[in-house]
Every structure is written in C-alpha cells, then in structure tokens.
Image (cartoon, grey):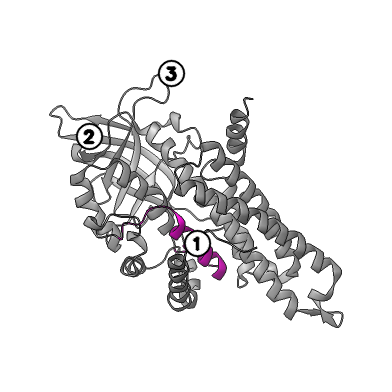
Amino acid sequence: MRRTVFTEDHEAFRETIRDFIANEVVPVYESWETEGHPPRDFYRKLGALGVYGIEVPEEYGGAGESGFKYQAVIAEETARAGVTFGSSGVHTGLVLPYLLEYANEEQKRRWLPGFVSGDLMTAIAMTEPGTGSDLAGIATTARLSEDGTHYVLNGAKTFITGGVLADLVLVVCRTSPYDPENRRAGLSILCVDTTSPGYTVGRKLKKIGLRTSDTAELAFADVRVPVENLLGEEGRAFSYLTHNLVQERLAIAVSAYAASAAAVRFALQYVKDRRVFGKAVAEFQNTKFTLADCEAQVVAQQSMVDRALELYQRGELTVADAAAAKLFCTESASTVIDKCLQLHGGYGYILEYPIARLYTDNRVFRIYGGTSEVMRSIIAKSLGL
C-alpha cells in the first residue's frame, strides 16, 4: 500500500541507513550475537552518522528535527536486514525524551554533546527483581545527605537494556518513604555515572532474542550521586515516566510492524527458491494463501502505524491510541512471523536464517513497554469500562 507518511528527506535518510547496515552491520553481525553486544566503537560510528543527534537541538550538537519518523525509518531498515543496532533504541527512543524534557540547561550542556557523538551511552533503570509493570512498587532508595550535596543510592535493578556498556544510567528510585495511600508519590530519577564507587554491573542476562542488545542486572551499594544529577523535580518521576510511555509504545508498534513486513519479505524469497515435490514452494496454494493473509495483516499494521506517527507528530496521539497500536501490531506480528517461519520448514528454526532471529526478537514486544494485558486494561478504561 502506498505510503505518504515519509518525506523525501526521510527516504534519503533511509538509503543512507540501508547502505550503512549493509557495510557496517551485516558482515559482522554474527560476532555481535556471540559477544552479546556491538563493539563500543560502533556507537561512535552511529554518532558520526548523525543518528543520535536527529532530535537534539543544534546548540548541543544535534540536527534539531522534531518527531519520531527518522527513528521509525531506522526500525524499518534494521528489521528489513534482520539485524539490530544493539541498545541504541533505548539511547535515543527512551532516554533522550527524558533529557530533552526534564534536564536543566547545565545538564543538557554537560551530557547532550557526548550523547550525540556516542561517547556517552545511556540506559534507563526502572524494572526491579520484584517490580515489573507496577512501577509504583519500586523499592530502590536514595537518601539525601545531611549537607544536601548528594544522594546515597541503594538497591537493585534487572532487565536493564544497555546496562553493560552504559556510561550514564537514569535510575528511578524512591527519595521519600513509601506511602500505601499514594504509591506513586516519592519517586525520582537520578542520573548515575557508571564509574561511581558502589555501582556494580551484575549478570549479563542471556535472552532468547535481541542477543546483540546487552541486558544486565545492576546493583547500588551506597552510591553517591550529586544533587546536580537529579533529573527534573524530586518526587515527580511517576508522572515523567507516564509522559514518555506514548512514544515508547509507538516505537514498539513500529518495530513490530517492521518485523512483520520483513518476515513476509524473507518468506517470499525463500518459497520462490525452495523446491519440494518437483516445484517451488511458492506454487502451492497453501503458500499463496498464507502469504496473502500475512500481507493483509502487514497492510493493516502499516495503516495503524502511519496514522499513529502522524498523530504523534501533531501531539495528538493519546495513551489509549498508543496502547491500541502496540497491542494490535505486536499481537499481529506474532501471528505473521510464526506463519512465515512455518513456510521455511526446518530451516526456519536455524539461526543463520533471519526469520529465526525475527521470531525470537519479536516475542518481547508483547512484554516490554507494558504487557499486552496492561494494554488491554488501558484500552478498556478508555471505553469507560
């Protein structure tokens, strides 16, 4: 289906990213999977390409573009090649909105130039061993020192994407005692230098998918964090987190759609080349009908994603809209990718085929950013239920 959501500038950027992936990522991607993340210098290459500075104002070294469409192009092109950019999506898609919205002028001048160049990689630490979607249950604490110069941070986080290589981590913590009458109160965001004494990277978690994205456990034992590293106002973190969920869920919806489109592309290539019983797999009616069903779902996902991108650009994408886009696209993607893998037969289960990576990478889309069950609850609430 013809698309109108992207401009000529977006399409020129697409060609640049496609060439970069072909030259800098695909030839070495298998080694990244073995290592568990790209080499640190790869992120500097992305910085030099301008990927990290697209939405950063010019005074901090960026291009000053608004909106999410350039990031959508990256999601589509990495999926098309069956690769990822490691933890870059968290750096630009999750952390950057917090820095742009809530960092003060001094913090922006201190952090954003390195953010843009890739010399300062970031992550955000919300999830804890006992706290997933229920962010109000966060137990990590930060106590203000008696002289008011720093916080003392204690606790643990898990499932932190980019946690192994990050230089600066936005840690969501409790800066005032837990109040059962108002569980969302008292949460703050501290920007923690990962070289700080008491800051520890624990296990590098082994996942079934997204194996080039380093995911780690983090621990904080009396970590001193200067008060100058408080992001925004103390006690306001829960509202900050809610504010960014719309973009986060839109990003996941875009990634799910891109994975679906890539799966159909990979399956088409395979069934045209693979021969059984004396003819190409593509010639069987089951193959044609299966791919027709998949393509119809991809078109539906594309329509929803493109509409959501336009609404987001205008500041009109609601929490319920984003939840609906994430729910539909991630659930539909699971069906599409599974059917496309089935058309590969036994080869679809072999990791050298990109459809296998798409299959395992895609599974987490229905979990992070809020599970499908949470999305259904949000949509139901918007219906007055």
Give the structural element (helix, strand or loop) at label 2: strand
Question: What residue do we see at 70% from left, 64% from top?
Answer: 341
Magenta stretch in the rendered image: 63-85
Q: Which residue is mark 3?
A: 180
Query: Position of 291 compared to 112: left or right?
Result: right
Question: What residue do we see at 70% from left, 54% from top?
Answer: 335
Amino acid tagged 3: Pro
Q: Which residue is mark 1?
A: 6
Residue 140 visible to an observer of this rendering:
no
Tag 2 near tag 3, CB within 8 Å = no
Determine crowd level at label 1: few under 14, some 14-19, many 20+ residues with C-alpha closer than 10 A: some
Give the structural element (helix, strand or loop) at label 3: loop
Residue 267 coordinates in the image, percent (x, y) = 70, 70
364 to 173, vertically: above or below: below
Mark in front: 3 vs 1: 1
Q: Earlier in the sequence, mark 3 or mark 1?
A: 1
